Image (spheres, rainbow, N blue to C red):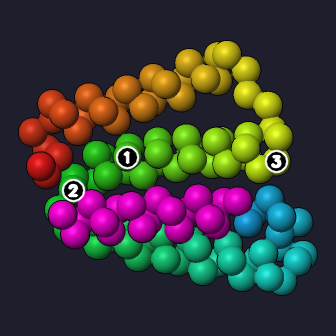
Amino acid sequence: MKNWLFLLIAILAEVTAISALKTSDGFRKLFPSLVVIAGYGTSFYFLSLALRAFPIGIAYAIWSGLGLLLVTLMRWWFAAEQIDMPGVIGMALILAGIIVMNLFSKTVPH
C-alpha cells in the first residue's frame, strides 16, 4: 500500500510542478520557479521509491496518465482553459487504460 502512496505523492508533486511551470514565465519568476524545481525533485524521488514495487512501464503509464488528467482538469477548473471533445475522448481512453492495467495486469501490485 505504501508504494501506491509513493506513486500518488509523485503524481501530485508533478502536477504541482507543471502547474507552476506555466506561471514561472520561462523561469523568470523566482517563487514559481522554485516550486517547479521542488515539485519535480519530489516527484522523481517518490517515483523512484514506487519503482521498487512497480515495473517502470506500468508506473510511468500511471504517473503520466493521471498527471495529464489532473493537470487538464485543474487548468479547466481554475484557469478556464477549454478542452474539445477529441481531447475528452483521448483522456477517457487514457483513464480506461489505467483502469484496465490495474484490474487485469499481473505486473501491477494488488
Closest to the observer, 40 or 8: 8
Q: In this view, does 2 lie above or below 59?
A: below
Pointers 2 and 3 in contact (CB under 8 A)? no
Give the residue number, with chain letter if any, for mark 2: 54
Horizontal side of residue 44 vs 70, given as left or right: left
Q: Where is residue 41 in the image (x, y as percent from the top left)?
A: 52, 77
Pointers 3 and 1 in contact (CB under 8 A)? no
**Mark 3–mark 1 distance (CA, rounded to whole Å):** 25 Å
* Magenta span of residues: 1-19
Q: Is residue 33 above or below residue 61?
A: below
Query: How many numbered marks have been drawn onto this rendered protein structure?
Result: 3
**Mark 2–mark 1 distance (CA, rounded to whole Å):** 10 Å
Q: How crowded is mark 2: few (under 14 residues within 10 Å), some or many (20 or more)?
A: some
Task: Say which amino acid is labelled 1.
Answer: Ile
Give the residue number, with chain letter if any, for mark 3: 79
Pointers 2 and 1 in contact (CB under 8 A)? yes
Q: Looking at the figure, which quarter contains the N terminus?
A: bottom left
Horizontal side of residue 55 vs 40, given as left or right: left
Give the image quarter of residue 77: top right
Q: In this view, does 60 lie above or below 26?
A: above
Between disc 2 and disc 3, the foreground one is 3
Q: How crowded is mark 1: few (under 14 residues within 10 Å), some or many (20 or more)?
A: many
For marks 2 and 1 on the same chain, the one whose residue lies earlier in the sequence: 2
Give the image quarter of residue 20: bottom right
Residue at the spot 18% in from the left edge and 33% down from the top edge: 103
Rendered image: mark on residue 62: 1
Assign the magenta stretch its main secondary structure: helix
Q: Where is residue 83 in the image (x, y as percent from the top left)?
A: 73, 28
Task: Say which amino acid is labelled 3.
Answer: Ala
Residue at the spot 38% in from the left edge and 43% down from the top edge: 61
**Residue 20 is a magenta residue:** no
